[in-house]
Image (cartoon, rainbow, N blue to C red):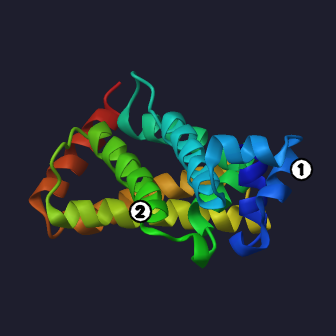
Amino acid sequence: MAAALELFGSHAGDEISIDDVAERAGASRALVYHYFGSKQELYLAALRSAAQQLTDLFTPPETGKPLDRLSTSLSHYFDFVERHEAGFVALLRGAPANRTDEVSQVVDEVRRLLTNRVLQEFGVTTPQPILRITMRAWISAVETAGLDWLESKDLPRKDLESLLVDHLVALLQTTARRDPQTAHLLKTATTLQTTP
């Protein structure tokens, strides 16, 4: 999987062959075909592996204040981004030829899981549309920030993580002016954050 993610994360999908993956993995072409059948199946399996690792790492700690737990989750997220750069890039920037419905479903499922985990941190299980859209926009910002950071690394990672927590709070403050559910969420989170 690591060899496939590395190749798919750094090259266009049509530039990569099963032979390339087999060579990079130190395996035979026949073995790769035996387990995956086609390049598309290998690509999907590699993406699912990366997606599972990423969502597992985004699980917040059981204790602590809401924004502190979110900050810890973001730190784990960026641990993945940093350690598995190719997998992260492949997950979010798969070549257009590889953007099948199945690939889109994998990426969308990751986004949905991450959005739901953040909402659950704030005690929301059924968000109203405006809150759902706000959270999805923030998840997209986190993804984009991760890709930008990998390209430039001109901002210390901890500063980026802190910026993203502040970004979420600012988005929620704006949304709270239009949505009672978000206003309640923000008030609850702020109260819990300041309680000793």
Which kind of residue does numbered mark 1 sit on?
Glu
Residue occupying the point 78% across, 45% down: 30
Q: Which mark is residue 138?
A: 2
Q: Which residue is mark 1?
A: 23
Q: Is residue 32 above or below residue 152?
A: above
Q: Using residue 73 as the reference point, say whether residue 31 is left or right of it.
A: right
123 or 174: which is nearer to us? 123
Residue extending farthest bottom:
96
Position in image of residue 4 (x %, y %): 74, 52
Residue occupying the point 66% across, 50% down: 81
Position in image of residue 46 (x %, y %): 63, 48
Which kind of residue does numbered mark 2 sit on?
Trp
Q: Quadrant of residue 12?
A: bottom right
Q: Using residue 150 as the reference point, say whether residue 175 is left or right of it.
A: left
Viewport quadrant of the N terminus: top right
Q: Which mark is residue 13?
A: none
Position in image of residue 3 (x %, y %): 79, 48
Residue extending farthest left:
180
> How far, Cα to Cα, is label 2 from label 1?
39 Å
Nearer-N-terminus badge (2/1): 1
Position in image of residue 47 (x %, y %): 58, 52
Question: Disc 1 on helix, strand or loop?
Answer: helix
Q: Using residue 108 as the reference point, say whether residue 1 is left or right of it.
A: right
165 or 152: which is nearer to us? 152
